[in-house]
Image (cartoon, helix red, strand yellow):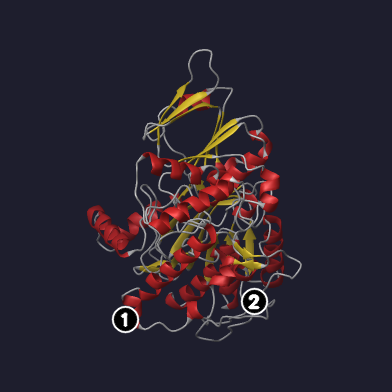
Amino acid sequence: MRVAVIGAGASGLVAAKYLADQGHNVVIFESSDKIGGTFVNKVYDETALVSSKTLTAFSDLRMGEDIPDHPSAEHYVAYLQQYKQTFLDTSKLIEFRFQTRVVEILRKNSPQEPYSVASSSTLAGEKDETFHAVAICSGLHNVPKIPAEEELPGIGAFKADPNTICIHSSEYKEKSIFQNRNVLILGCGETAMDITKRAVLGQANSIGIVVREGFLSIPHLMAEEKPLDVFITNLFEHSYEHPWVHFLQLRWKLSTFVIRLGLLLVGGSSWGFGQWACRVSEVKRGFHIINKAHGALPNINKGQRLKELKLSQERGEKKPLLAALWERFWASVERKGVMTLGLAGGEGEKDQGVMPVTPYNTQVASIRKGSEGGKGWTVTFRNGEKVEGVDTIVMATGYKQEFPFLQRYRSELNETLGLKDEEERERKRKEEDACCFRHSQGDDYLPSEHFITDPRDPRVAFIGFARPNVGAIPPQSEMQVQWWLQRACLCGAPGGGGAGGGGRGHGTSSVQRKSSPP
């Protein structure tokens, strides 16, 4: 069979490898001129992975001992190049189409080759080809989500001011842009925290971070050479779980209590590791994507313990004796300038000087030009707070999930099965109700079967779009591909393995997960 793979990032490469292993001819469409996806196109100064090399590597090619526990983007792209050379370049069944963008995918009436893929290339022009199956591996970080004027009143005028800087986090490259600037960062994901740290190191005059709903901060290193994800993925986490234990979520509830107690004893706060600001409303294990980029947390924390104690005293709150003593202890820790466990000290304190970053646990209400003769812009928040003099805004607001090349495909799929638009919307709503999360408003939705396939058309797959709570997307994509091969009956194709290497899975009816010594 002939299979189209859209994207030559980590998910696209592993999809192509397993498809070729089963004897399929694979065409990989990549809009840029090289492999790597996000790790090439969206990198900034000193980008490093927050997942460890142990859990980020594919099962059949481990990363070398000379690579740090948390590889840099350059290390990881070199690893993907090695993976390509080892498994893809040796196969005559795989063809790369660089600088080629997929324009549209359509269903055809022909059962032999049911999909038409239209592409546009800077090298070969426009093409319309047929395929037996399609794997969409275009990635989570593809289309920046940029707030509109309705969401950020005044942002248009702010952008038009020649004295201001307003960028999406995907455009950020180097910390020198922050020197002597008054910076406001919108968002609290790992990229937002990375950029906040770089604004500190870039010697900004002032820094604020706007956090709408809070985040749960756990450092990606539990101790030296002890990555968080390796520590968590232990025997007890993956042992047998009785159906009643699973139904009642006893393991989650018990581990939440144990984790929060540990956080409280070690860092003074049960809301995150040493986290005293930007808290989530409720800490429940399995309900939050952990923010493992903690470099700027000491800057955000600065002054928060004393502030909480002062507010508590002003309100005349009466707390249990132990809680009051605990609060005063940690306030004295901050007052004396003592930091905890190297999170806010050691090298981080020396490099950053513990410059305060002001957290705003709210949303932006308006952005207006400062008073006449004043410098910068005034940002007013919904809780009434204000920050003046802002001249730089970084929108770390994430990415939209869009598949513009699938619009007609989805409409035609519904028509073929006799579904009307109203029925499709109701089906989508029911799918989302069954999911553990909602898609953001305006996002294109993922299919219902493990977010990989639509049961009505299982030979179109979405690989690499579900992010694990702990771990990394690439090895999860590897498992998704293996599941899809069986679900779509793409295993054991005639002539499996093909000429030129690959060959594993030849003539078999199931996909074997390969592994090598760590």
Quarter of the rendering occupied by the C terminus = bottom right
Residue nearest the observer in this picture, 259 or 217: 259
Q: Can residue 174 be seen in this view?
A: no
Instruction: Please provide percent x and percent y for residue 447.
Output: 38, 63
The number of callouts visible is: 2
Instruction: Please provide percent x and percent y for residue 384.
Output: 37, 31
Within 10 Å of the Cα at label 1, are there few (<14), some (14-19), or many (20+) other Cα atoms?
few
Instruction: Please provide percent x and percent y for residue 144.
Output: 50, 44
Distance from Cα at disc 1 to Cα at disc 2 = 35 Å
Secondary structure state at the residue bearing disc 1: helix
Q: Are marks 1 and 2 in contact (CB under 8 Å)?
A: no
Secondary structure state at the residue bearing disc 2: loop
Q: In this view, does 355 lie to the left or right of 282?
A: right
Q: Mark 1 points at which residue?
A: 244
Could you say which quadrant of the image residue 74 lies in?
A: bottom right
Q: What residue type is labelled 2?
A: Asp
Q: Can residue 199 be seen in this view?
A: yes
Of labels 1 and 2, the one closer to you? 1
Instruction: Please provide percent x and percent y for residue 61.
Output: 67, 74
Report the disc number at residue 60: 2
Counting residues from the start of the chain, the first of labels 1 and 2 encountered is 2
Residue nearest the observer in this picture, 369 or 417: 369
Q: In this view, does 74 lie to the left or right of 168?
A: right
Q: Residue at x 55, y 19 (%)?
A: 375
Residue nearest the observer in this picture, 214 or 53: 214
